[in-house]
Image (cartoon, helix red, strand yellow):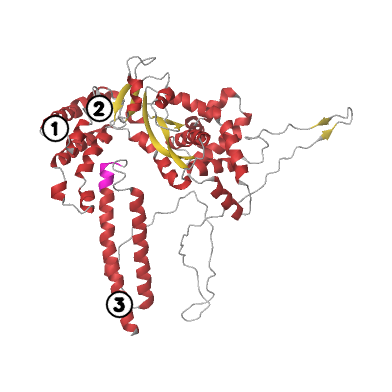
């Protein structure tokens, strides 16, 4: 009976490992295809996060079955079905090493002789973490009295980032980054701090967040000026649930992004966020009041007032996103999504949509090769390589659309690029200006954290809370875009700002802060 049970467990382990191997490979293929088509495209079809969670469960199931098999019949192996795991990367060199030496034998384990000599050692490295430590810093100001005039002398009290100064800059930065960068609401932070032996009320944390927003206002204003000083911006928006009477209402979070790196520009990247309770067109008009240049966005009509000929100081030029246009064709040519719905691939997949996706991808392939080149080089490459493909695509879509009913989904996807006067011109503006990107993916990436955060904090508590979130997102995302740790940067800014004259505040901007950090390290 025991032997039969052991054999059954072995068979179950083999079957489980085989089935999970197949599913694992299918998921990997889907992931690779997604990477080929772009990280921001078709997010509703195959999310990378969902793939990673599924892979994690598969790995756990296989390990569970293998452990049960080994426990039931330790002499039986299923090595033929085991996957070879990749070699583990070495731990970072900058981490400190603590040697724990196991007590050596004093005699030979074979014959018992005491004449043994060390010939070497084997080292096994295990990554460990030290729990967070809290401490109270006592700032002492000694008093001295004068024997002659009997006056008291004492150093002045230090300035603090926030009023009353009970929280240090590192604690404040941690609270801010966890709330707005890691999407951990203050109530969850307060619960975790209490478990660590430090009770801080929710109202006290909220008070410090508000005080930090006021203290960081000069930095935010400089970032805003830097973003609106660009000649080309990315723009996009996403939904944010806002607490309202009887439930929630759909508010919006807008982003305006400056990123000159694709054309080799020297200006540092930065992001500016705004919050609004709705999506009316006056919001982008107000956000970009007085600004003129090239706006890369989707075809949302709310930007149209910026493109009007009477806009002051000058009309904004529209550059539309090719990723949005491609996505409409991809949805009609997504073989895997069609099969998942139980439909016949041969009947549902449009060959015209599939051909359109191939033509789009050929253009995207060229664009990937010239990303990072200076604007002049990008312009020359586009004239030689991309313009002929765009012209062929235009003519091909016109011919195919003329053969279809206007209600055909493929015709609707084609008309998205032509349905309004000047839309095709906005789509092809990138051909004549090397600074313009083919897509608006930069803005979509800047809003990805907000989409993840919605699952954690569920809704914004008030319009002022939404404004505060947009304020902090501007700081944190700008720091990330400049490849620095937002929490470390916020901590240093909060520590230095009280004693820094206004003329030196630009030193604290993320790109200048990073430059100083590199100089000190050298």
Magenta span of residues: 33-38
> Which mark is in front, 2 or 1?
1
- Circle 2/circle 1 CB separation < 8 Å: no
Point out residue 174 in the picture as x, y percentages from the top left corner.
55, 43
> Which mark is in front, 2 or 3?
2
Residue under numbered circle 1: 401
- Circle 2/circle 3 CB separation < 8 Å: no
> Which mark is in front, 1 or 3?
1
User: What whole-number distance in Å separates the C-alpha atoms at marks 1 and 3?
Assistant: 60 Å
Magenta stretch contains residue 346:
no
Residue at 29 percent of width and 67 percent of height: 16
Point out residue 486 in the picture as x, y percentages from the top left corner.
49, 39
Residue at 27 percent of width and 35 percent of height: 324
Q: Who is closer to the viewer here, 313 or 156? A: 313
Question: Which mark, residue 8?
Answer: 3
Mark 1: few, some, or many residues within 10 Å (few <14, many ≥20)?
A: some
User: Is label 3 in a helix, a strand or a loop?
Assistant: helix
Residue at the limit of the structure toward the bottom, as seen here:
1
If you read the primary sequence from the N terminus, does the residue marked by circle 2 or circle 1 appear first?
1
Residue 506 vs 75, above or below: the answer is above
Residue at 39 percent of width and 31 percent of height: 279
Residue under numbered circle 2: 427
């Amino acid at each position: 009976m025991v032997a039969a049970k052991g054999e059954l467990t072995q068979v179950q382990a083999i079957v489980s490992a085989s089935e999970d191997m197949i599913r694992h490979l299918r998921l990997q293929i889907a992931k690779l295809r997604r990477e080929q088509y772009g990280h921001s495209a078709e997010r509703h079809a195959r999310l990378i996060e969902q793939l990673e969670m599924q892979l994690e469960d598969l790995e756990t199931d296989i390990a569970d079955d293998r452990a049960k098999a080994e426990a039931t019949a330790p002499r039986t192996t299923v090595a033929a079905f085991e996957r070879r795991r990749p070699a583990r990367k070495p731990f970072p060199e900058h981490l400190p090493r603590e040697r724990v030496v196991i007590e050596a034998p004093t005699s030979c384990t074979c014959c018992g002789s005491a004449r043994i000599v060390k010939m070497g050692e084997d080292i096994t490295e295990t990554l460990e973490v030290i729990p967070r430590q809290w401490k109270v810093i006592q700032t002492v100001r000694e008093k001295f009295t004068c024997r002659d005039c009997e006056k008291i002398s004492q150093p002045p009290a230090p300035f603090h980032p926030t009023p009353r100064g009970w929280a240090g800059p590192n604690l404040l930065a941690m609270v801010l980054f966890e709330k707005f960068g890691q999407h951990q609401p203050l109530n969850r932070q307060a619960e975790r701090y209490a478990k660590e032996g430090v009770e801080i009320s929710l109202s006290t944390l909220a008070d410090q967040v508000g005080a930090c927003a006021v203290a960081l206002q000069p930095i935010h204003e400089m970032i805003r000026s830097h973003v609106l000083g660009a000649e080309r911006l990315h723009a996009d928006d996403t939904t944010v649930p806002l607490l309202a009477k009887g439930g929630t209402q759909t508010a919006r979070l807008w982003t305006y992004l400056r990123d000159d790196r694709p054309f080799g520009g020297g200006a540092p990247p930065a992001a500016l966020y705004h919050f609004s309770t709705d999506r009316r067109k006056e919001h982008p008009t107000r956000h970009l009041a007085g600004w003129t240049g090239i706006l890369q966005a989707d075809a949302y009509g709310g930007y149209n007032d910026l493109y009007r000929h009477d806009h002051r100081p000058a009309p904004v030029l529209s550059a539309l996103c090719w990723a949005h246009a491609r996505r409409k064709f991809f949805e009609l040519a997504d073989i895997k999504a069609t099969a998942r719905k139980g439909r016949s691939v041969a009947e549902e997949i449009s060959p015209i949509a599939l051909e359109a996706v191939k033509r789009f991808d050929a253009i995207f392939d060229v664009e990937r090769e010239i990303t990072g080149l200076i604007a002049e080089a990008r312009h020359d490459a586009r004239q030689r390589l991309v313009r002929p493909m765009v012209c062929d695509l235009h003519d091909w879509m016109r011919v195919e659309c003329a053969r279809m009913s206007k209600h055909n989904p493929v015709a609707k996807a084609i008309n998205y690029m032509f349905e309004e006067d000047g839309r095709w011109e906005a789509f092809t503006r990138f051909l004549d200006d090397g600074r313009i990107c083919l897509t608006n993916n930069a803005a979509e990436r800047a809003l990805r954290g907000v989409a993840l955060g919605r699952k954690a904090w569920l809704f914004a508590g008030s319009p002022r809370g939404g404004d505060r979130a947009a304020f902090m997102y501007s700081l944190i995302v700008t720091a990330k875009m400049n490849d620095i740790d937002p929490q470390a940067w916020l901590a240093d800014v909060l520590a230095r700002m009280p004693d820094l004259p206004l003329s030196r505040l630009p030193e604290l901007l993320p790109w200048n802060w990073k430059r100083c950090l590199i100089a000190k390290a050298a």
